[in-house]
């Protein structure tokens, strides 16, 4: 009788465990849907990510620090086709900024856990952003470091991934990233730093440019120190080797 009672208790426990699991799963899906719908209602459309030349903008670094105001009369040299971006430069950017760029759907599935850890352990809102999320922050959102902005960034990144190809997203990222000083976009940076078109960049030049957007004023050959951008370039090369 005792063994029979133990078996019944185990079955009952398993039943409630399965029921609780499915219940929490449903609540999770419903909660995610409600959050998605709530934050989506006031978001800009993904099509606005394609900027027109002369767009007034504020440039922030990766830490949210305002670097420069870029106004409509600023000189910019947008690159029109991904085919004009050297293979070296594409590989360098992906290697150092988002090695899983061609695999994910706009976000890193593990990023929310890192963000939660950083908030509760380090008491700061930090977390790895994909190239798509960085594009969203540069073009569509402010650099406010809040949970609300992170949620909006996530939603827009997913929407952009559905609307544009990976090569289109990479090209927009390169055209909308800060490269130190008033230089906005890889086309402008290539002309100002190396006096050449992007398509003519060699490996070393590509690696230097790929490393700048994370901290433009530190890694810029003009405003930074030779040691800073040299070490950054070496880091980019190492990441490229690791990715094969």
Image (cartoon, rainbow, N blue to C red):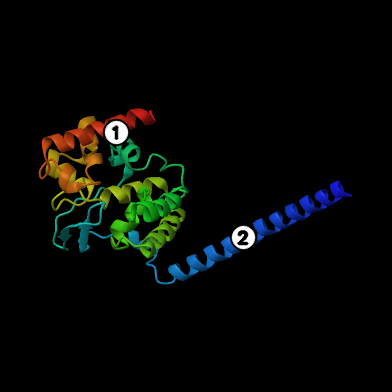
Furthest residue toward right:
1
Q: At 39% from the left edge and 68% from the top edge, which residue is drawn?
A: 43
Q: Nearer the viewer, residue 233 or 118?
A: 118
Residue 165 x/y as whole percent: 42, 49
Q: Nearer the viewer, residue 63 or 95?
A: 63
Residue 41 x/y as whole percent: 44, 71
Residue 234 x/y as whole percent: 23, 31
Task: Report how far apart the C-alphas of labels 1 and 2 lie in the structure.
Answer: 47 Å
Horizontal side of residue 83 vs 157, given as left or right: left
Residue 149, relative to residue 101: is it above or below?
below
Q: Is residue 50 visible?
A: no
Q: Is residue 83 visible?
A: yes
Number of residues whose C-alpha sits closer than 10 Å to that of mark 2, classed few (under 14), some (14–19) or many (20 or more): few
Q: At 70% from the left edge and 58% from the top edge, which residue is drawn?
A: 19
Q: At 28% from the left edge and 60% from the top edge, which residue is drawn?
A: 143
Q: Nearer the viewer, residue 27 or 189?
A: 27
Whether residues under marks 1 and 2 lie with C-beta atoms below 8 angstroms apart, the answer is no
Please tell me whether mark 1 sits on a helix, a strand or a loop: helix
- Give the total number of marks visible in the rendering: 2
Residue 55 x/y as whole percent: 22, 62
Please tell me whether mark 2 sits on a helix, a strand or a loop: helix
Q: For residue 196, what is the image quadrant?
A: top left
Residue 229, relative to residue 151: is it above or below?
above
Q: At 61% from the left edge and 58% from the top edge, which residue is drawn?
A: 25
Image mark for residue 125: none
Image mark for residue 88: 1
Number of residues whose C-alpha sits closer than 10 Å to that of mark 1, classed few (under 14), some (14–19) or many (20 or more): some
Q: Nearer the viewer, mark 1 or mark 2?
A: 2
The residue singled out by tag 2 in the image is 24
Looking at the image, tell me whether mark 1 or mark 2 is earlier in sequence order. 2
Which quadrant: the C terminus?
top left
Horizontal side of residue 102 vs 217, given as left or right: right
């Amino acid at each position: 009788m005792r063994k029979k009672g133990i078996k019944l208790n185990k079955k009952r426990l398993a039943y409630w465990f399965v029921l609780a699991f499915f219940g929490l799963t449903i609540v999770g899906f419903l909660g995610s849907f409600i959050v998605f719908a709530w934050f989506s209602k006031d978001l800009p459309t993904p099509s606005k990510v394609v900027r027109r030349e002369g767009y007034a903008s504020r440039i922030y670094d990766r830490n949210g620090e305002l670097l420069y105001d870029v106004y409509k009369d600023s000189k910019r040299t947008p690159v029109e086709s991904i085919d004009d971006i050297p293979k070296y430069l594409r590989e360098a950017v992906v290697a150092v900024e988002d090695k899983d760029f061609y695999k994910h759907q706009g976000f890193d599935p593990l990023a929310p856990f890192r963000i939660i850890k950083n908030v509760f352990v380090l008491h700061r809102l930090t977390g790895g952003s994909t190239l798509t999320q960085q594009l969203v922050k540069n073009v569509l959102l402010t650099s406010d470091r809040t949970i609300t902005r992170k949620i909006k960034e996530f939603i827009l990144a997913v929407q952009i991934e559905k609307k544009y190809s990976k090569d289109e997203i990479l090209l927009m990222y390169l055209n909308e990233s800060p490269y130190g000083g008033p230089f906005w976009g890889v086309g402008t940076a290539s002309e100002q730093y190396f006096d050449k078109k992007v398509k003519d960049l060699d490996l070393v030049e590509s690696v230097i440019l790929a490393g700048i957007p994370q901290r433009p004023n530190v890694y810029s050959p003009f405003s930074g120190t030779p040691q800073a951008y040299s070490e950054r370039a070496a880091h980019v090369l190492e990441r490229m080797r690791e990715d094969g």
